[in-house]
Image (tube, rainbow, N blue to C red):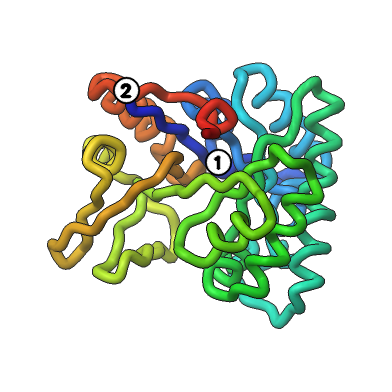
């Protein structure tokens, strides 16, 4: 049976007169887009334009929900309640779903951003609130995350879950991501090698030289790296050359 893999990327993070990322270029390569909903990046016009671009290219539409931290790009933790996690998710994803439907598409998935992601990956109560919000958006809306906490919450609420791996970041010996202070240009071949290893061997190498198991169904490429378009093209070319079928995550359920 052929290996199937989705490629996702963070999109729609421009705001007002400020442009972030290589959305138009990446949208021709990826299969799922995590679109900012105005709280860490993006604004109503950018949301509309990015959704339209995704529909044009047949790319799955996802809500990239965040804490209300536009100045900090959603990367700063906040003291919030599980109810607020639920409300924040439903508020942002609901708005993006409306733009998707207006453009002739539909919401495929929800993926937290930045500190929101980390908090929900570590705190079972937050993960539960997130899963409940995703469930409220529709029975077929997928939750995209990594780690051990979120899939349990998704299963408890009957939410489709898609585990993801990052291919343009390094991993430490505990399986955590080694984050960058600012996005740097990556060697396309290095990223492509990691993508092929994860897809075909279900493992990833760490910065200390060890190898960890990694069984995921979607691979994330960050759209704000200077050469993200080149990296994404190389990744897709190498994956397809290795016999991996690249499809949107909505086609991989079950």
Question: Is disc 1 in contact with disc 2, using a CB cutoff of under 8 Å?
Answer: no
Q: Quarter of the image holding residue 39?
A: bottom right
Horizontally, residue 234 falls left or right of residue 46, namely left
The numbered mark, 1 or 2, whose residue comes first in the sequence reads: 2
Which residue sits at x=67%, y=17%? 56
Q: Nearer the viewer, residue 62 or 46?
A: 62
From this view, report whether residue 217 is shown above or below residue 164: above
Looking at the image, residue 76 sits to the left or right of residue 99; the answer is left
Q: Residue under circle 2?
A: 1
Dot 2 alpha-carbon crowd within 10 angstroms: few under 14, some 14 to 19, many 20 or more: few
Residue 78 horizontal/vertical position (percent): 68, 78
Q: How many marks?
A: 2
Q: Quadrant of residue 75?
A: bottom right
Q: Is residue 8 above or below residue 112?
A: above
Q: Is residue 247 visible?
A: yes
The label shown at residue 216 is none
Query: Does 101 sit left or right of 196 as displayed?
Result: right
Give 185 or 210, whichever is nearer the viewer: 210
Secondary structure under the numbered disc 1 in the rendered image: loop
Name the residue tied to disc 1: 21
Residue at 55% over, 62% down: 152
| Front tag of 1 and 2 | 2
């Amino acid at each position: 049976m052929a290996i199937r893999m989705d490629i996702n990327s963070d999109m729609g993070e421009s705001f007002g007169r400020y442009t972030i990322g290589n959305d138009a270029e990446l949208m021709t390569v990826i299969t799922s887009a995590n679109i900012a909903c105005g709280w860490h990046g993006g604004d109503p016009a950018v949301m509309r334009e990015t959704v339209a671009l995704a529909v044009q290219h047949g790319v799955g539409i996802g809500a990239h929900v965040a804490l209300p931290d536009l100045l900090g790009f959603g990367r700063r933790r906040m003291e919030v309640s599980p109810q607020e996690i639920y409300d924040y998710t439903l508020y942002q994803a609901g708005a993006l779903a409306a733009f998707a439907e207006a453009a002739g598409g539909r919401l495929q998935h929800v993926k937290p951003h930045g500190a929101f992601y980390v908090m929900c990956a570590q705190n079972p109560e937050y993960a539960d609130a997130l899963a409940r919000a995703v469930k409220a958006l529709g029975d077929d809306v997928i939750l995209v995350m990594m780690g051990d906490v979120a899939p349990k919450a998704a299963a408890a609420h009957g939410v489709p879950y898609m585990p993801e791996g990052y291919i343009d970041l390094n991993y430490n010996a505990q399986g955590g991501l080694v984050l960058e202070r600012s996005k740097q240009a990556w060697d396309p071949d290095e990223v492509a090698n990691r993508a092929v290893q994860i897809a075909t061997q279900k493992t990833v190498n760490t910065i200390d030289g060890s190898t960890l198991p990694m069984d995921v169904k979607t691979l994330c490429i960050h759209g704000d790296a200077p050469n993200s378009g080149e990296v994404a093209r190389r990744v897709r070319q190498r994956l397809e050359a290795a016999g991996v079928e690249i499809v949107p995550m909505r086609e991989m359920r079950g």
